[in-house]
Image (tube, rainbow, N blue to C red):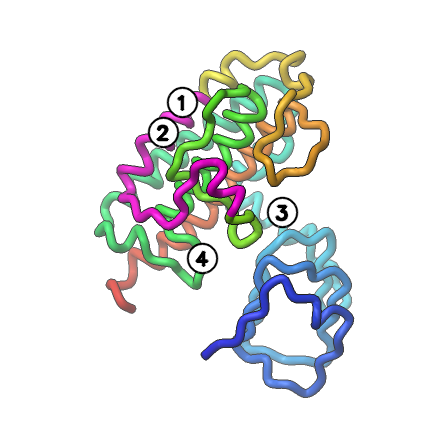
Amino acid sequence: MTAEYIEDDRFRGARVRRCDLAGLEIRDCDLSGIKIVDSWANVLRVDGYFDHLVVNDVDVSAYVDAELDRRHPVRALARVATSPDEFRGAWDEIETLWAATLDRARSLPEAKLHERVGGEWSLVDAQRHLLFASDAWLGSAVLEEQTPYHPLGLPAEPGFPAADTAKLGLTPDAAPTLDEVLAPRLARMAVMRRTVEALTDSELDRICSRKPADPYPDQEYVVGRCLKVVLKEEAEHHRYTVRDLALLETTTPGE
C-alpha cells in the first residue's frame, strides 16, 4: 500500500541521500528551496508554479512560460488582460476553445469522461471545478449574488475544508454526467459573457464588498483581479483537458 503524508511538516529541511524515490509523487506542496543534486531519472516531470526553475544551473523558467504561451496563446491573453477590450478578447477565445473541446469530448463514451489521467481530475471534474471557480470569483465576489454556488461545483482539493464545502452547499461526492454539469456550467459562462460585455475601466477598479468564499483570506478583492482569476482558471484547465483528451482518445477503458 502506498504511504501518504498529508499536511505533514516532518520532511521540512530534511536531507534524503541514496534513497530509491522512483515513483514518488509530490502534490500541492511548498517546494521552496528544494535542491535535487547528483541524482538521475529517465523522466522527471514537474508541474506547478515556479518563480524560478533551475536545471543544471540553467534557469529555464522563461523558456517554459514562452513555450506554454506558444502552444496555448490564451494563457497570455488571460495573464496580460488589463482593459475591458482585453478581457472581452480573452473571453472570446476561451469560449471558442471550450466549444470545440467539449464537442470533441462528446465523441467519447461517458465512462471516459470520468477517467482520471495520471491521477488528475477527470474532464467532468474539471468542468465542475470551473463551475465553482466562476461561482466564487464572479457570482459571489463580483456580482454579489445571494446564492452563487451550484451544488455540483468542485473546489480545489485537498485544501478546501470539508466544513466550508458543506456550508456552501457543495456536493463533492456527487457523480453527475457531463451534460448535468454543463447545464449550470454553460449558464455561468453566459453570465461571464454578459459581465465582460458590460465591463468598463471604472468597474475593473471597483473594490468588491464580498470575498469569493469563506475559506479565502479577508483582504481587498478588486473586480479586475477576480475576473482575471476566472480567465486564468479557464485557460489553464483547458490546457490540462486537451492534454488528457489526447490520451483518452488513444486508450480503451481500463487501460
Front position in the image: 221 or 173: 173
The residue singled out by tag 1 in the image is 190
Calculate the distance from the C-alpha at mark 2 to the C-alpha at mark 1.
6 Å
Q: Return the disc, 1 or 3, that comes first in the chain's sequence.
A: 3
Please state, as top left, top right, bottom left or bottom right, where the N terminus lies in the image.
bottom left
The residue singled out by tag 4 in the image is 120
In front: label 2 or label 3 = 2
Q: Return the disc, 4 or 2, that comes first in the chain's sequence.
A: 4
Calculate the distance from the C-alpha at mark 4 to the C-alpha at mark 2.
23 Å
Query: Looking at numbered disc 3 in the image, what kind of residue is underneath it?
Result: Ala
Residue at the location (63% across, 48% down)? 65
Query: Looking at numbered disc 4 in the image, what kind of residue is underneath it?
Result: Glu
Please say if 222 is above or below 161: above
Q: Which residues are magenta?
A: 163-191
Query: Looking at numbered disc 2 in the image, what kind of residue is underneath it?
Result: Leu
Q: Are marks 3 and 4 in contact (CB under 8 Å)?
A: no
Query: Looking at numbered disc 1 in the image, what kind of residue is underneath it?
Result: Ala
In front: label 1 or label 3 = 1
The residue singled out by tag 3 in the image is 66
Q: Position of residue 86 (x, y in %)?
A: 58, 23
Q: Are marks 2 and 1 in contact (CB under 8 Å)?
A: yes
The residue singled out by tag 2 in the image is 186
Calculate the distance from the C-alpha at mark 1 to the C-alpha at mark 4.
27 Å
Determine crowd level at label 2: few under 14, some 14-19, many 20+ residues with C-alpha closer than 10 A. Answer: some
